[in-house]
Amino acid sequence: MIARLSLDTLAQVPETVARPGYEPARHGAGIVHIGVGAFHRAHQAVYTDAALAGAGGDWRIDGISLRSTQIADALNPQHGLYSLIERGEEGASARVVGSLRRVIAAARDGQAPLAALAAPETRIVSLTVTEKAYGIDRARGCADEAHPAVAADLAAARRPQGVLGLLCEGLRLRKEQGLPPFTILCCDNLPDNGGLVRTGLVDFAARLDPSLADWIGAAVAFPSTMVDRITPAPTEETQAKAQRLLGLADLAAVEAEPFTQWVVEDHFPTGRPAWEQGGAIFVADVAPYEAMKLRMLNGTHSMMAYTGFLCGHKYVRDVMRDGALARLVRRHLKAAAATLGPLDGIDTKDYADVLARRFANPAIAHETYQIAMDGTEKLPQRIAAPALHALVHGQKLRPFAFAVAAWMRYCLGRGEDGAAYALRDPREAAIAAAVKGVEGDARGICRALSALPGLFPARLVQNAYWQEEVETVLSAMLEKGVADTVRREAEGLPAGG
Ligand code: CS2
């Protein structure tokens, strides 16, 4: 049987694979990270690895897996070690990352998550749990009491299972013990992610204990951040590739594109690792970077996901090989860029070129179906916000209307061959109820889905021109098919943008 990657076998890793530039076991932990999925392992953990190598410190990461036990079972026998495979056009390279110390599986490890959050050495709690896991009502700016985890944690605050519940109880324990709070670093693709989590958490705490809420509001730092690295869900092929490169089995390997970016608001009163060693950029205001990434990268990604999936393209790279869709990608990037304010040292045209190349990376198998997931959580910041900006400023609306129509077509849950697929959206039931009985009627679908609370700003959906644009595209998709609509839409657009 092939040996597993671990501290005991690390020395066997071939020279061609980079190893941690420090001795992992000599460093204590300073970070608890909630949500130890592929993205965290391809991004923040890698920056922390570089910080430990370049500047040292007790900044290793204790991960908390909220639902899965599988990640803990993969990583703990490996002493937290795993490999990151970077895949670009020129080939693949691998490195072993040593910044993760252990993973706690909240589903079976009892009080261990709270013990980690309340530990004196914990100075930062970072999160990548996906947009839907927070249970924050963004339209109302409060904790969403209808969210299952929020409801459960409000009812049993000392045994929390969800994000807000864990953060709140962890902070309550620290306050009780006279410990300083930890800094909370949300690394999900949400606008003003620090401010948003602050709003949700303070409101959640206020429902349990107003004095705790006051303390959180006054003493806890919530820096905002923009994170970026395209990281497909790992597959068996990822593990097989890692085994070939390492000569050891690695059940926690991840693969990602070579590009990586991290822009962080530099507000860490409890200290932080020297993440600049890995190339992180520290700024006073993250908002313009965040808007650029959410609208240009993620907005275009969502448009590609819905149209691409419905045209039968499994991966993002296949969308870029479809001439008509590639033109629409360029059109969307341009329209999204037009909604942004100027950003020092950044030319959005260059950024768009880099994005188009990243999307086309032939070595990255990023599923359109993966990106299509959780549309109701993604559309507001990716499509609706820039669309509203475009409306207010008299800019092009059509690219955004096109993306929304594709999402609406996707919401019907059936491909053009009639085969059903799961929407994988937290509001799946509300979507199904909304479109029931109007499946063939573009206007009916458009009205019903536009009325879902909190999804589209009123000013946008009440605009007759916007509505007409969405309905026109959707009705073409229903009558002529998505591929044909894409082809007609792209006619006359330049190939290279
Ligand atoms: C993607 C993102 O799945 C999605 O919705 O748009 O995960 C995207 O790959 C990352 O934000 C890239 O940094």
Image: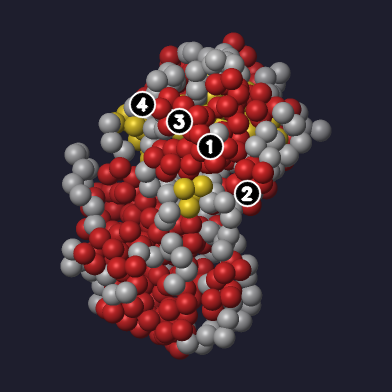
Q: Residue 55: where, in percent of width, then height? A: 43, 14
What secondary structure is found at the residue carrying circle 3? helix
**Kind of residue indicated by mark 4:** His
Q: Are marks 2 and 3 in contact (CB under 8 Å)?
A: no
Residue 214: mark: 3
Image coordinates for residue 138, horizontal then vertical, percent: 44, 52
Please tell me which residue lies in front, 351 or 285. 285
How far apart, in angstroms, are the residues tagged by discs 2 and 3? 21 Å
Horizontal relation, residue 127 to residue 161: left or right: left
Q: Quadrant of the N terminus?
A: top right
Disc 3 marks which amino acid? Asp
Element marked by disc 4 = loop
Q: Which residue is mark 4?
A: 267
* Mark 1 or mark 3, earlier in chain: 1
Q: SS of the residue at dot 2? A: helix
Q: Is residue 304 above or below residue 341?
A: below
- For marks 4 and 3, give the CA distance: 19 Å
Q: CA distance from mark 2 to mark 4?
A: 31 Å
Are discs 1 and 4 less than 8 Å apart at CB? no
